[in-house]
């Protein structure tokens, strides 16, 4: 499993409010992704074991781990593709289990490679990506 995944920001900036309602502290930045104690079990096998982390809007977040760590399983749960065994995930504030369609609408995909299928027309390629967010 992913070695140290508790990336939740415990260092909320403390007491720096200027009092003008224009706080720019890190804790004021909305959360793009909130994952809390998420678990995926396949039978007796635990593929993702109690993972929690936040990603703020505008933040670039890399999900790293060795093969079999559970990265793809975690992403599949966060993107509504497979059921979550326990815990929660919110994307742009939308709970992926309670409101999967809203969560999907907030998700975009950029492939690393094979960005288009040469056996398909341009329109067919575009429709594949369009359908992912519908
Ligand atoms: N559908 C499945 N059924 C049973 N085990 C699975 C399934 N999908 C993934 N696993 C197992 O869960 C673990 C995590 O897999 P995966 O999420 O693909 O890891 P990663 O993407 O980090 O390489 C692996 O041990 C894998 O064999
Ligand atoms: Mg993978």
Image (tube, rainbow, N blue to C red):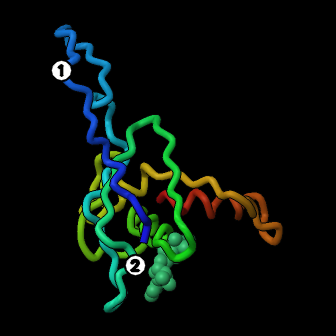
Residue underneath mark 1: 15
Q: Name which of mark 1 and mark 2 comes first in the sequence.
A: 1
> In the figure, residue 25 lies in which quadrant?
top left
Which quadrant: the N terminus? bottom left
Is the CB of mark 1 within 8 Å of ligand 1?
no
Q: Residue at x 29, y 52 (%)?
A: 94
**Dot 1: within a 10 Å radius of its alpha carbon, few (fewer than 14), some, or many (20 or more) residues?**
few
Q: Residue at x 31, y 51 (%)?
A: 34
Q: How many marks?
A: 2
Secondary structure of the residue carrying numbered label 1: loop
Q: Nearer the viewer, residue 61 or 127?
A: 61
Q: Nearer the viewer, residue 105 or 66?
A: 66
Whole-percent x and y of residue 52?
A: 31, 57
CA distance separating discs 1 and 2: 39 Å
Is the CB of mark 2 within 8 Å of ligand 1?
yes
Q: Nearer the viewer, residue 29 or 66?
A: 66
Q: Is residue 131 left or right of residue 79?
A: right
Which residue is outermost to the right?
118
Q: Residue at x 77, y 58 (%)?
A: 122
Whole-percent x and y of residue 99?
A: 28, 59
Observer-side mark, 1 or 2, equals 1
Residue underneath mark 2: 47
Q: Is residue 103 above or below residue 1?
A: above
């Amino acid at each position: 499993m992913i070695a140290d995944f508790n990336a939740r920001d415990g260092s909320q900036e403390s007491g720096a409010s200027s009092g003008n309602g224009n706080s720019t502290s890190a804790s004021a930045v909305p959360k793009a992704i909130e994952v809390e104690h998420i678990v995926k079990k396949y039978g007796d096998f635990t593929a993702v074991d109690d993972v929690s982390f936040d990603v703020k809007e505008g933040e670039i977040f890399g999900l790293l781990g060795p093969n079999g760590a559970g990265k793809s399983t975690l992403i599949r749960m966060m993107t509504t593709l497979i059921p979550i065994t326990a815990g929660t995930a919110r994307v742009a504030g939308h709970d992926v289990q309670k409101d999967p369609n809203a969560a999907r609408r907030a998700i975009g995909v950029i492939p690393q490679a094979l960005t288009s299928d040469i056996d398909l027309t341009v329109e067919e390629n575009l429709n594949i990506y369009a359908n992912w967010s519908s």
